Image: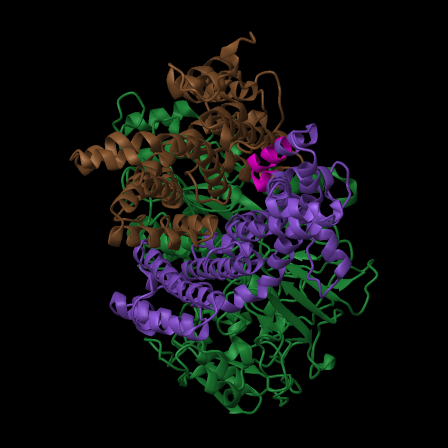
Chain colours: A green, B purple, C brown
Amino acid sequence: MIFPRKRHAILAVAAMAGIALLVASSGTGAGEQRKKGGTLILLSAGDVDYVDPGQAYYSFSFQVLKPVHRALYTIPADVLTAVPDVAAGPPKLSNGGKTVTVKIRKGIRYSPPLNREVVAADVKYAIERAFALSLANSYAVAYFGVLAGSPAKPPKTPKPISGITTPDKYTIVFKLKRPNGAFVDALVMPMTSPVPKEYAAKYDNKTSTDYGFHQVATGPYMLANDSKGNVKGVGYTPGKLIKLVRNPNWDAKTDFRPAYLDGAEIREGFTDSTVASRTILNGGADFNADFGPPPAIIKQVLSTAKYKDNMYGWPLGTTYVGLNTKKAPFDNINVRRAATFVLDRNAMRLALGGAITGPIATHFIGPDFSGKGFEAAGGFEFNPFPSPNFTGSVAKAKAELRKAGYANGTYTGPAVTAVVSNIPTAINQGKILAASLAKIGIKVNLKAVTTDAMYTKFCGTPKNQPELCPSVGWLPDFKDPVTLLYVTFSGKFIPETGNVNWPQLDDPKITAAMEKAQLIGNAKARYTAWGKIDRMITLTAGAIPLQWTNTLNLVSDRVVVAKMKDVQGQVDLAYTSLK
Amino acid sequence: MGSAGLFGSVLSRIRSPLLRYVVRRLAWSGLLIILVIFLTFLVFYQLPSADPAQLRAGRLATPELVAEIREKFGLDRPFYEQFWIYIRSVVTDFDLGYSYYKNLPVREEILSRLPASISVALGAFILWMAIALPVGILTALRPRSRSDRAVTGATLFFLSAPTYWLGLVMLFLFASDIGRFPLIGGAGTYVPLSVDPKAWFESLILPWIVLACGFAGLYARMIGENLRETMATDYVRTARAKGISERRVVIRHGLRAALSPIVTLAALDLGFLLGGTILVETVFNIPGVGRYAVDAIQNADLPAIQGTVLFGAIFIVLAILVADILYAVLDPRVRY
Amino acid sequence: MSIGPDALVTDEPSATGPVALFWERMRSDKVALVAFSFLTVVLLAAVFAGPITQLVAHPPNAQYSDRLDPVFGTPTGPSRDFLFGVDSVGSDVFSRVLYGARVSLIVAIVGTGIALLIGTTLGILAGYYRGIVDTVISRTVDVMLAFPLLLLALGVASACSIGQGCVGGLIRPGLTTVIGIIVLVSWTYFARLARGQVLSLREKEFVEAARATGAGDLSILGREILPNLLTPILVYLALVIPQNILLEAALSYLGVGVNPPQASWGQMIADATPLFDSAWWYFLFPGIALVLTVLAFNLLGEAVRDALDPHLSRT
């Protein structure tokens, strides 16, 4: 998923090897006094992308929708293993892994105004609808395209998929084109949350579905709606407010979630993250949903005794500077290496708030993949572009430039452009990058645009892409290095729009190695292979690794935290409680 | 303008000169609003060099989606046709278009934030008039005194300071959470009047002071001058000669005449007040129309900016209209 | 002063003329002198920002991350070699305040200057030729004045900062956009003023006389009308410039001013806002610089007005 959490992060599907038969505990916090009741208040700068589980894409949306829509399998709070949710038990694989059978739990009912019981056909419809153009889901093809009969070209409205069948009311069978271990892992995605066809079809058959504004819930909470089922203006006022209330048809006996809270209120539009952070620290709200505390707040929290329990970090993902390898001067590897040598990464990190925001990255697979490729990639030791305290080395940079043909080690070509997000910390990082590159003669023109525009108009569209994209990063979809390196550095994935291979790296050796690595069955061997790939990518200097990020979450005094460990450690609304 | 032809013949039917004046002003305001709509449309249509369909498509700007948007919003039609659609929707439904952000209707977004902005602007107005009136009267009665110069000096100082900077200074000194001398609500503490009147009031004290600072002195001076001038005029002297007490002279005749130019000026200063409100809302995190405009600008949300600019302009035109008519009613010396 | 008969003579045109009278009044106005000297200092600071920063400070865009808190990255305050402290990336605030003076002065003077030229010309044309020319120009002025200025400025600035800028790329985001906006919102003042003055002047006897002797329009404009316009225009200039300095600062504060890392007082205050409660130097010094500069212009403007025509001054 895309970084930073502030604006873009595809929901996380963290699942370790397979799905375990685990009955989830109600999470940690054994010593905390948990109170039943109360409404949690979350603050966000922007809005969720969608409230429809078949469309939602941001990790912020995932935090809001996870307690509302039960998927086939789910990862409970404070753990990293998936458990059956709408499913009654683990999936049964047969036919050499090409057939996956899942039994549905009985007794789950939809929220008012629908009220009926969930059946297997609803899961079938949920997956089918995600392929339709009226939903414009971004990951359906990637993770579920392996289903037999799934459409090659997205249909305008939902069409049945022959590879999904429901032999009886509570059984669903998936037939795959070929065996695929990732398919089972993907069954935790929200698009597998059941959707009643007879109720939703009329919304899904429009050019752009608005089922989200009329949705029914299966989880302990629902978006508040009126008697006709309309959510807009009641439970969801776009850009302003989301209200979660208890789902009266939720049966705790069919679920493992404790659901302490009576509901949650997500207040949107808090674009000043300093003021919003302070509001949370002073108890005016409870959690930061889609922004991080700025450096001054970080300092205040860590230096003031009374705030020490109000912030916790969660390590996940890597940030980096994307160098456009298809555009001069960064099409030359020595110029890229020079840029990597000269960048003052220590200052870049200070601009975000210092060491607490995460260790400085020397390659891409970070310590959050400990045992799953971090060591294979060289751990903290592999540092091919060293400099004293990561402040950058002008001498080594100049040496590289000389190799690139610049006589006295100083760049003499035209100025380059860097497009950054218009968030203060990102602009400061842009300034630091510009100052570092100026030391070797590269003049950088800074352009600050909205994060959306930075990703969609500039850095995500190869033909508009500037030479430098300093505000990019990636969150792994699940704990296998493939999700961190594949779509981001493989030459196979450079689409015209929505490109996330920001360096536009197209190295045939690396691409081939990635294809080989995915076929390796043995986990340890696979991680070793990806570790080698990480080293290769780092040496191309197509991207300058910045940090292995530690996402900082702010909570008010009254919150007993239960973390979504598969994402960025956000509070899981179905497990969190007030003190 | 306008005294010929059909309009002229309609006008001549009206007996009362005041009514004729009102009708003329109304007609002019109507025309002005149309011109304003045209200019706004022109600015936001012609100036930006980016493709509006692409901007509206946003994140997943596939060619199909962009084409669909272009068709749906009529972005491929010629200029005059687009303008006609635009002005028709503004005039008939007061429809100000749809934001690039989730296609939210701009009108609703502005109207829902209007109460907060009105709280800020109106409260500041009351505050500065409450200061300006007594101070103005005082300076009128004691010209060239030290207090007069002090007021001038202080006024100039506050008028020279950027509103947002004054706001920061105020917060730095007096905000309850971070101020050096914590007194009242800081940034982000605004709640609507309907939710909690006490908190609403407290959160607005600092913003009101910041906005009122420059205006208070300005108006005090203006009121003082006008009062002094009027006090020296004939009809006030006559009133005094008739034996009416000084107090009544000041209040009845002098003040009333002094206030009428103030009325007009208040309307003209509206533009500055709106600008000041934008800055105050930004610093104090008040969710008003000004903040909406600033956020729209940060997000390059052209329809929202366009709608807000149009809204502000129409508001000013109407305010000037009201002020002109009030002026004509209040001051019999006005020639119309 | 002697109490001779000459002391009783008033309003007699002195042999030295109105210009010398003006300077005499200006020179005796202490406040004006202070304001003028201050502005001279600001101008010198702006012009010589380069050498000054080289001597006693640091380059404005150089970043000294050792001046940031090593743990949290927050900036440190005034010290012996960083007179005004550093900002959030470690740049010298003192240097940036000096260079910020450049932006404020250039934008205000160039922008207001262009607005003056355009506005005065249009105003003169409207006032002198009347008829359709006057109608078109006056109505345009009326329409422009209906707009809330800051909002319009923000809107235009924003519209011109996406894509390739406006007017076919002539106005790109940054300094040119800001100057363009200043021109857009200020020309109306000068136009209205010029028109009003010309309207009253053209009826005066000396104009009639000139016309009677067969002088052409251009010569009348040049010889009779323009010189009499100078006074009010100058007064206006002195009052509009500080307004435009504040406008540029407001635009920069809201993020649509000059491009980073160029120093601008408004932008520095904006950068300082997230940290203002701890890094007080960062918002205080640029703010004071702004206030004092604008105040100086305002005081000077008032003094100019008083000196040019004492009858206009407040009693």
Give the residue drawn at x 42%, y 75%. B92
Which of the pair B47/C114 is nearer the observer? C114
Quadrant hosting residue A328: top left
Main SS, magenta region, reads helix
Is the residue A240 above or below the residue C296 in the image?
Answer: below
| Residue at far front of view | B242
**Would you say A245 lies left or right of A435 here?**
right
The x, y position of residue B95, in whole percent, is 44, 71
The x, y position of residue A273, in whole percent, is 60, 49
Does residue B188 show up? no
Where the C terminus of chain B falls, by quadrant? Answer: bottom left
Residue B162 lies within the magenta run: yes
**Would you say C309 lies left or right of A66 here?**
left
Quadrant hosting residue B46: bottom left
| Residue at far bottom of view | A168
**Would you say C208 lies left or right of C138 here?**
left
Region rendered in magenta:
B153-165
Is the residue B251 above or below the residue A199 in the image?
Answer: above
The x, y position of residue B138, in whole percent, is 71, 39
The x, y position of residue A146, in whole percent, is 40, 73
Give the residue drawn at x 59%, y 70%. A65
Which of the pair A351/C35 is nearer the observer? C35
Where the N terminus of chain B falls, by quadrant? Answer: bottom left
Does residue A217 show up? yes
